[in-house]
Amino acid sequence: MAALARWCRNRRLTVVLLWITALVGLTAAAGVAGSAYSKQYDAPGTESGHAASLLADAFPGQAGDSETIVWHTPAGGTVRAGDVEQTMTKVLDQARTLPGVTAVTSPYGLTGVGQISRDGHTAYATVDYRQSADDIPAGQAEALVKTAKAAQHPGLQVELGGQAVGSTEGTGAHVSELIGIGVAAVVLLLAFGSFAAMLLPIATALIGCGTAYMAIGLLSHGMTVADFAPMLGMLVGLGVGIDYALLIVTRHRRGLKRGLGVDAALEEAVATTGRAVVFAGGTVCVALLGMLILRLSFLNGVAVAAALTVLLTVGASITLLPALLSYIGPRALSRRQRRALAEQGPRPEAPGGLAARWSAFVERHPKLLGSLAAAVMIVLAVPTVTLRLGSSDQGNDPAGTTTRQAYDLLAKGFGPGTNGPLTLVATTDGGAARLAVDRLPDTLRHTPGVASVGPADFDASGRTGVITVVPDSAPQSRATSQLVRQLRADVLPAAERGSGLKVYVGGTTASYDDFAAVVVGKLPLFIGSVVGLGCLLLLLAFRSIGVPLKAALMNVAAVASSFGVVTTIFQWGWGSEWLGLGRAGPIEPFLPVIMVSVLFGLSMDYQVFLVSRMYEEWRETRDNRRAVRVGLAETSRVISSAAVIMIAVFLAFVLTGDRVIAMFGIGLAAAVTLDAFVLRTLLVPALMHLLGDANWWLPGWLERRLPRISIDRRPEAPAGAPAAPADRPAVALR
């Protein structure tokens, strides 16, 4: 690592130009190629997936996306009034001429029977597109919204729903990034007191994340990448990127304060903290790539995209950052610090102030403080027991969006199930099966939980039929999921018996329930693999059985408690509308997998930075009390600063208005808050004080067989450097 630092320092212009060239080149390539992100979150081999495949083969004309235009008149008027019908008929005629539209079904025609509510105040039309929602250009969806909204006036409310329309809802993505970066800049300026030193972590993270963002767009053409993957990558990349650079700059500044020259301090920072950054980034990537175990195509893309972002931010931290640090030289210190260094000479930094007092306080009261920390984590984790995975939909959008308004109007006028009907796809192999399909709608109408059933519609060959079933409950309701299970377990098997008929249940709720079942079934293997790999890495790094086991326990605690916060806000609805995140609803089935990956990786970061300093002191003194005390005192301030930056970045993404990204932002912010301020600076040191020398125990036979990995190896002192060991306190913390 020291050699890498020297190379980057000696060829600093080359390093800077290489990074800028990569960013500009990928930006140009992404601009030309565009992106091909996917909004389809399904799992292969499920019943709902098979139903969708059969439907696409038998009715290719229905394979495209379908949007909905909903209009409503207040009391005193109806949608059948002449002026309303004339206005909306004109709108629908214009919609038929829009690019990409293949058909528009009007409630005023023979084919639109049932598209006007019983009270006559609400009506809707369906707009069918040739392409799926993923492939509909934003301009086409915006044209539909503009055409329909032009008819709205005080006596006529017009709203739109559908995936393509939902993609036109403006988000505050760039605003959130700017706010997060702004808060990070303030924290860095307060921590460093140097404007130049403040800029470098932000510039490094932005270049690393920007390069990754453009690369992910190109990657989407080669593999399935979820539409939220780039934003998730930016969310994680900005947080860890700024933090990693902060840690290296902090170590570099310590070297300068001890009297090292710029070059010597730079080499030491990269050779010590840089190694910890590489190790921490590696654990994050391992945790993210653990999603590949699930073998779900769109999660594979998320895993690769997020890991690529972390990898590039780590690369920027150990190559671009040293080059930039060599440019600013002594200005990494504030003017006051440079003046004190010139007048008083180098002085090793002794931990003091609040950090030292807190460390001594934890040492004196490990049982009490450890118990309090454990109680906090348990209380916050309790809501996780009620976690329900399911299909949040446009009914969970913020109240002011057109998609939410359309959803609510349909639910009020036609029943909640109208927003997510079930699709039953039947395959027949003879007359008896065809007859069974014809009788099936009558059976379904008498099934509890069913509001209405459409007639059976057959393809040209007569071998595939489709029946639309509208539940009497919302798509995300437990009752709708129960109806899906009842149809599959009881109603449909009875109808199939002895007829050669086979019926598959599809639709929004069925698809999400199937996906959730696949994820939950593989979750134990996934979590076990991620935890196991993380423990193995820590075992190799710290030569201890206790350190990896405590890390695994702390990671599980952070995950459970952060999920408790997510459940409280998004599923219980405590403050979700106030935060502009829409009404309460179930948690997305893929959220646990992605959050577990990210949280395990981020939790390992703080474990590495905290315990590596303790381990370093333990190797030199063999005094566990001193090792824990000094390690906590010297790292708690930088961990707190890094955590505040990461929390600010994560919470800023709540402003995007995207429910999924907001879940990630709040969940990750909660996890980092608890990890940094409850676990790593309270519960972990308390436990390490209680366990004593057992923290560092490793069986001799295992010690001899394990390869040696050094996280924070000190380089040999450069010529002319002071003899004092780096970062050793001048005054013992007794």
Image: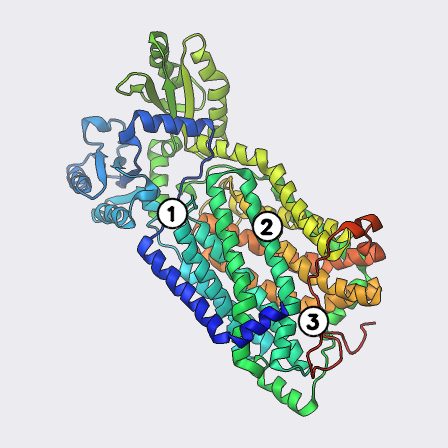
Residue 489 in the image: state x and y as whole percent: 50, 19
> Mark 3 = which residue?
715
The residues tagged by marks 2 and 1 sit, at their Cα atoms, a distance apart of: 24 Å
**How busy is the neighbourhood of tag 1: few (under 14 within 10 Å), some, or many (20 plus)?**
some
Which structural element holds mark 2?
helix
Q: Residue at x 80, y 55 (%)?
A: 695
Which structural element holds mark 3?
loop
Which structural element holds mark 1?
loop
Q: How is the image coloured?
A: rainbow
Quadrant assignment for the N terminus: bottom right
Quadrant assignment for the C terminus: bottom right
Q: Which of the two discs, 2 and 1, labels the residue nearer the N terminus?
A: 1
Residue 613 in the image: state x and y as whole percent: 72, 65
Q: Amino acid at mark 1?
A: His
**Which of these two is toward me, 283 or 386?**
283
**Which of these two is toward me, 333 or 374?**
333
Q: Amino acid at mark 3?
A: Pro
Q: Residue at x 33, y 19 (%)?
A: 464
**How busy is the neighbourhood of tag 2: few (under 14 within 10 Å), some, or many (20 plus)?**
many
> Mark 2 = which residue?
286
Whether residue 428 is visible to the viewer of this picture, yes or no, is yes
Q: Which label belongs to residue 221? A: 1
Residue 14 in the image: state x and y as whole percent: 47, 72
The residues tagged by marks 3 and 2 sit, at their Cα atoms, a distance apart of: 27 Å
Q: Which of the two discs, 1 and 3, labels the residue nearer the N terminus?
A: 1
**How busy is the neighbourhood of tag 3: few (under 14 within 10 Å), some, or many (20 plus)?**
some
